[in-house]
Image: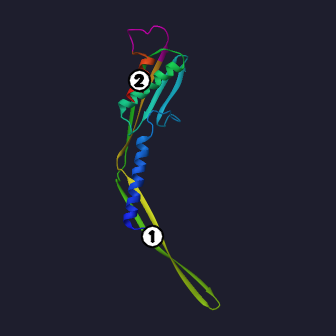
Amino acid sequence: MFNLSTIARTAALLASLTLAACASSPQYVAADDSSDFGHYSTQLADNRYRVVYNGNNRIDLNKTKDYALLRAAELTLQEGYSWFEVVDRATTSKEKSFDRPGTGASVERSYEVERNCGLLGCTERVRPSTTVGMHAGTGAAEEKHSYALEVLMGNGEMPEKGGNYYDASSVAKSIWERM
Protein backbone atom coordinates (compact mmCIF):
# COMPACT_ATOMS: atom_id res chain seq x y z
CA MET A 1 0.00 0.00 0.00
CA PHE A 2 1.33 3.45 -0.92
CA ASN A 3 1.11 6.38 1.44
CA LEU A 4 1.43 10.02 0.45
CA SER A 5 4.96 10.42 1.86
CA THR A 6 6.23 7.46 -0.21
CA ILE A 7 4.65 8.93 -3.32
CA ALA A 8 6.16 12.36 -2.64
CA ARG A 9 9.63 10.84 -2.13
CA THR A 10 9.27 8.85 -5.35
CA ALA A 11 8.18 11.96 -7.27
CA ALA A 12 11.16 13.93 -5.91
CA LEU A 13 13.56 11.13 -6.83
CA LEU A 14 12.18 10.89 -10.38
CA ALA A 15 12.40 14.67 -10.82
CA SER A 16 16.02 14.67 -9.58
CA LEU A 17 17.01 11.85 -11.91
CA THR A 18 15.37 13.58 -14.86
CA LEU A 19 17.17 16.85 -14.14
CA ALA A 20 20.48 15.05 -13.67
CA ALA A 21 20.06 13.29 -17.02
CA CYS A 22 19.36 16.63 -18.73
CA ALA A 23 22.28 18.35 -17.05
CA SER A 24 24.77 15.63 -17.90
CA SER A 25 23.84 15.19 -21.55
CA PRO A 26 26.47 16.39 -24.02
CA GLN A 27 26.04 19.83 -25.53
CA TYR A 28 28.36 19.58 -28.53
CA VAL A 29 26.67 17.01 -30.74
CA ALA A 30 25.78 16.42 -34.38
CA ALA A 31 22.20 17.26 -35.33
CA ASP A 32 20.05 14.55 -36.90
CA ASP A 33 18.55 17.16 -39.23
CA SER A 34 18.52 20.93 -39.70
CA SER A 35 15.80 21.51 -37.08
CA ASP A 36 17.45 19.35 -34.40
CA PHE A 37 19.75 20.44 -31.54
CA GLY A 38 23.45 20.34 -32.50
CA HIS A 39 25.65 21.05 -35.51
CA TYR A 40 25.23 20.35 -39.19
CA SER A 41 26.93 21.59 -42.34
CA THR A 42 26.20 21.98 -46.02
CA GLN A 43 28.83 22.04 -48.75
CA LEU A 44 28.29 25.04 -51.03
CA ALA A 45 31.40 24.67 -53.24
CA ASP A 46 34.69 22.72 -53.17
CA ASN A 47 36.11 24.73 -50.27
CA ARG A 48 33.01 26.60 -49.09
CA TYR A 49 30.57 25.41 -46.40
CA ARG A 50 27.67 26.67 -44.34
CA VAL A 51 28.09 25.51 -40.73
CA VAL A 52 25.16 25.83 -38.30
CA TYR A 53 24.81 25.10 -34.60
CA ASN A 54 21.28 24.95 -33.16
CA GLY A 55 21.07 25.64 -29.43
CA ASN A 56 18.35 25.85 -26.81
CA ASN A 57 17.79 26.79 -23.13
CA ARG A 58 20.62 24.50 -22.00
CA ILE A 59 23.33 26.63 -23.61
CA ASP A 60 23.61 30.35 -24.10
CA LEU A 61 24.05 32.06 -27.45
CA ASN A 62 27.79 32.69 -26.93
CA LYS A 63 28.41 28.97 -26.41
CA THR A 64 26.34 28.27 -29.54
CA LYS A 65 28.66 30.63 -31.45
CA ASP A 66 31.71 28.83 -30.03
CA TYR A 67 30.30 25.46 -31.10
CA ALA A 68 29.67 26.74 -34.64
CA LEU A 69 33.28 27.98 -34.80
CA LEU A 70 34.52 24.67 -33.39
CA ARG A 71 32.59 22.73 -36.02
CA ALA A 72 33.96 25.02 -38.76
CA ALA A 73 37.51 24.37 -37.51
CA GLU A 74 36.97 20.60 -37.29
CA LEU A 75 35.43 20.50 -40.76
CA THR A 76 38.30 22.56 -42.18
CA LEU A 77 40.84 20.08 -40.81
CA GLN A 78 38.71 17.09 -41.86
CA GLU A 79 38.61 18.41 -45.44
CA GLY A 80 42.42 18.78 -45.51
CA TYR A 81 42.65 22.57 -45.10
CA SER A 82 44.55 24.52 -42.46
CA TRP A 83 42.61 27.80 -42.12
CA PHE A 84 39.19 29.23 -42.82
CA GLU A 85 37.63 32.62 -43.39
CA VAL A 86 34.18 33.50 -42.08
CA VAL A 87 32.58 35.28 -45.04
CA ASP A 88 29.07 35.52 -43.59
CA ARG A 89 27.32 34.91 -40.28
CA ALA A 90 23.74 34.97 -39.02
CA THR A 91 21.95 34.51 -35.71
CA THR A 92 18.35 33.37 -35.33
CA SER A 93 16.44 33.21 -32.02
CA LYS A 94 12.92 32.01 -31.22
CA GLU A 95 11.18 31.83 -27.86
CA LYS A 96 8.09 29.84 -26.93
CA SER A 97 6.59 30.27 -23.46
CA PHE A 98 4.48 27.91 -21.41
CA ASP A 99 1.88 29.34 -19.05
CA ARG A 100 1.34 26.56 -16.53
CA PRO A 101 4.16 26.11 -14.04
CA GLY A 102 3.97 23.63 -11.22
CA THR A 103 4.39 20.09 -10.08
CA GLY A 104 1.99 17.65 -8.64
CA ALA A 105 1.18 14.15 -7.64
CA SER A 106 -2.17 12.47 -7.51
CA VAL A 107 -3.46 9.30 -5.96
CA GLU A 108 -6.75 7.81 -6.97
CA ARG A 109 -8.27 5.04 -4.90
CA SER A 110 -11.08 3.04 -6.44
CA TYR A 111 -12.79 -0.28 -5.86
CA GLU A 112 -13.72 -2.83 -8.43
CA VAL A 113 -16.78 -4.90 -7.61
CA GLU A 114 -16.90 -8.30 -9.20
CA ARG A 115 -20.26 -10.06 -9.04
CA ASN A 116 -20.72 -13.70 -9.96
CA CYS A 117 -24.19 -15.16 -10.07
CA GLY A 118 -25.12 -18.77 -10.42
CA LEU A 119 -28.06 -21.11 -9.69
CA LEU A 120 -27.66 -20.89 -5.92
CA GLY A 121 -27.22 -17.14 -5.64
CA CYS A 122 -24.67 -14.38 -6.18
CA THR A 123 -21.29 -13.66 -4.66
CA GLU A 124 -19.54 -10.33 -4.64
CA ARG A 125 -15.84 -9.66 -4.37
CA VAL A 126 -14.46 -6.15 -3.84
CA ARG A 127 -10.89 -5.41 -4.99
CA PRO A 128 -9.17 -2.13 -4.17
CA SER A 129 -7.23 -0.38 -6.95
CA THR A 130 -4.71 2.49 -6.60
CA THR A 131 -3.52 4.72 -9.43
CA VAL A 132 -0.59 7.09 -8.89
CA GLY A 133 0.16 10.01 -11.22
CA MET A 134 2.91 12.65 -11.29
CA HIS A 135 3.61 15.70 -13.43
CA ALA A 136 6.12 18.50 -13.53
CA GLY A 137 5.95 21.70 -15.54
CA THR A 138 8.40 24.56 -15.35
CA GLY A 139 6.25 27.27 -16.85
CA ALA A 140 9.48 28.58 -18.31
CA ALA A 141 10.11 29.70 -21.83
CA GLU A 142 11.74 27.39 -24.33
CA GLU A 143 14.37 29.19 -26.34
CA LYS A 144 15.83 28.02 -29.62
CA HIS A 145 18.68 29.83 -31.29
CA SER A 146 21.01 29.03 -34.13
CA TYR A 147 24.24 30.49 -35.33
CA ALA A 148 25.22 30.03 -38.97
CA LEU A 149 28.63 30.63 -40.51
CA GLU A 150 29.56 30.56 -44.15
CA VAL A 151 33.23 29.63 -44.33
CA LEU A 152 35.79 29.56 -47.10
CA MET A 153 38.65 27.12 -46.45
CA GLY A 154 42.25 27.44 -47.54
CA ASN A 155 45.77 26.05 -47.25
CA GLY A 156 49.21 27.55 -47.04
CA GLU A 157 49.88 30.93 -45.55
CA MET A 158 46.79 32.47 -44.01
CA PRO A 159 46.03 35.99 -45.29
CA GLU A 160 46.66 38.64 -42.66
CA LYS A 161 44.33 41.40 -43.85
CA GLY A 162 40.91 41.91 -45.30
CA GLY A 163 38.83 39.21 -43.62
CA ASN A 164 37.93 37.15 -40.60
CA TYR A 165 40.58 34.44 -40.88
CA TYR A 166 41.10 31.66 -38.35
CA ASP A 167 43.76 28.99 -37.94
CA ALA A 168 41.66 25.81 -37.70
CA SER A 169 43.97 23.93 -35.30
CA SER A 170 44.26 26.87 -32.90
CA VAL A 171 40.49 27.48 -32.85
CA ALA A 172 39.68 23.81 -32.22
CA LYS A 173 42.27 23.50 -29.47
CA SER A 174 41.19 26.73 -27.75
CA ILE A 175 37.48 25.85 -27.70
CA TRP A 176 38.03 22.22 -26.64
CA GLU A 177 40.16 23.43 -23.71
CA ARG A 178 37.26 25.64 -22.48
CA MET A 179 34.65 22.88 -22.71
Quadrant housing residue 70: top left
In this view, the residue farthest toward the right is 119
Q: Which residue position is annotated with label 1?
A: 1
At x 46%, y 66%, the residue is 131
Identity of the residue drawn at 50% across and 34% down = 31
Identify the mark nearer the N-term, 1 or 2.
1
Magenta-span inclusion, residue 154: yes
Instruction: Locate residue 125, reporting x and y percent.
Output: 54, 81
Where is the C terminus found, in terms of image quarters? Answer: top left
Q: Amino acid at mark 2?
A: Arg
| Element marked by disc 1 | loop
Q: Main secondary structure of the magenta part?
A: loop
Q: Point out the frontmost of discs 1 and 2.
A: 1
Q: Which residues are magenta?
A: 152-163
Residue 89 is tagged as 2
Instruction: Confirm whether residue 90 shows in the render.
Output: no
Horizontal and vertical percent position of residue 95 = 37, 40
For the N terminus, which image quadrant?
A: bottom left
SS at mark 2 in the image: strand
Instruction: Kindly identify the amino acid type of the residue bearing the numbered disc 1.
Output: Met
